[in-house]
Image (tube, rainbow, N blue to C red):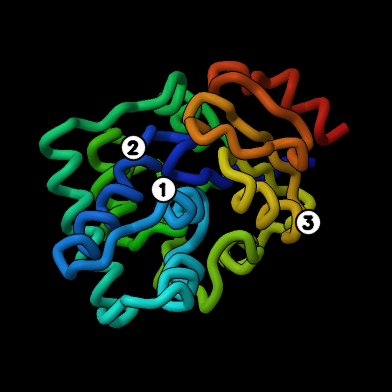
Amino acid sequence: MLRAVLFDLDGTLADTERQNAEAVARVLERLGRPLSDEEREFVIGHGWHEIYHHLVTNGGVTLGYEELMHAAGRERVRIVETEGLDVLPGAVDTVRRFSSRFASTVVSGSSRAEIEAVLKSLEVLGCFPWFVGAEDTARGKPYPDGYLLASTRLGIAPAECLVLEDSTAGIRAARAAGMKVIGVRAGNFAKQPQDEADRVVDTLVDVTDALVASLFD
């Protein structure tokens, strides 16, 4: 039985994955350390712990974990203020529809400040009593920690949770947590594989009650 719906943020509710990578790139470029194409790809869908470890392993990063995360967060806010926020099809309606009927929260690899800023822009912050960000777990996606923490806080078993995701790392995190997951193509601009999802749809508009029911029969 479905009792909870857990939302990814970047690439699922808002088309912000490119902005996330660009924010990291701008911070590092000011320090004379360019972000490679491979690293830009890695930023998509991964949690901040994993992103930072990946960059440090590649060398040339002089900022600490929290320094880089918060600097990139501030840069991302500037990018959004300049470029605007591209809301993905059906995002707001889907959040409101499901949060009015099921326990709901956001599980994201972004910092809590970034999550709050985006949810405010979408005008859905009030739909979630709390959310899970990068600061809340020791490991981010593709590890299941964030989704398992949300399950524990809600007091709802993983098998009774549905996750909406866009990235390979996010889908793997949800599956590792023992949850059903729908992959959404609309914000997956990098065309990351979504074949590990239980279902894949073009947009959140396609996440119908009938589709959801078919996953929990």
Judging depth in this view, the residue of 66 and 130 nearest the camera is 66
Residue 178: assigned label:
3
Judging depth in this view, the residue of 11 and 147 nearest the camera is 11
Of badges 1 and 3, the one in the foreground is 3
Rendered-image quadrant of the N terminus: top right
Q: What is the distance, in whole Å, between disc 1 and disc 2 at their CAs?
A: 8 Å
Rendered-image quadrant of the C terminus: top right
Q: Amino acid at mark 3?
A: Gly
Crowding at dot 2, Cα within 10 Å, few <14 / some 14-19 / many 20+, comes out as some
Relative placement, left or right, of 168 versus 123 is right
Circle 3/circle 2 CB separation < 8 Å: no
Q: Please give the residue where the numbered disc 1 appears in the rendered image.
A: 128
Figure quadrant of residue 139? bottom right
Judging depth in this view, the residue of 164 and 212 nearest the camera is 164
Q: Amino acid at mark 2?
A: Val
At x 75%, y 30%, the residue is 199
The x, y position of residue 150, in whole percent, is 57, 61
Q: Please give the residue where the numbered disc 2 appears in the rendered image.
A: 124
Crowding at dot 3, Cα within 10 Å, few <14 / some 14-19 / many 20+, comes out as some
At x 27%, y 71%, the residue is 68
Sequence order check: which comes first, mark 1 or mark 3? Answer: 1
Local SS, label 1: loop
The x, y position of residue 134, in whole percent, is 42, 67
Circle 1/circle 2 CB separation < 8 Å: yes
The answer to whether residue 106 is visible is: no
The x, y position of residue 27, in whole percent, is 20, 62
At x 19%, y 67%, the residue is 32
Circle 1/circle 3 CB separation < 8 Å: no
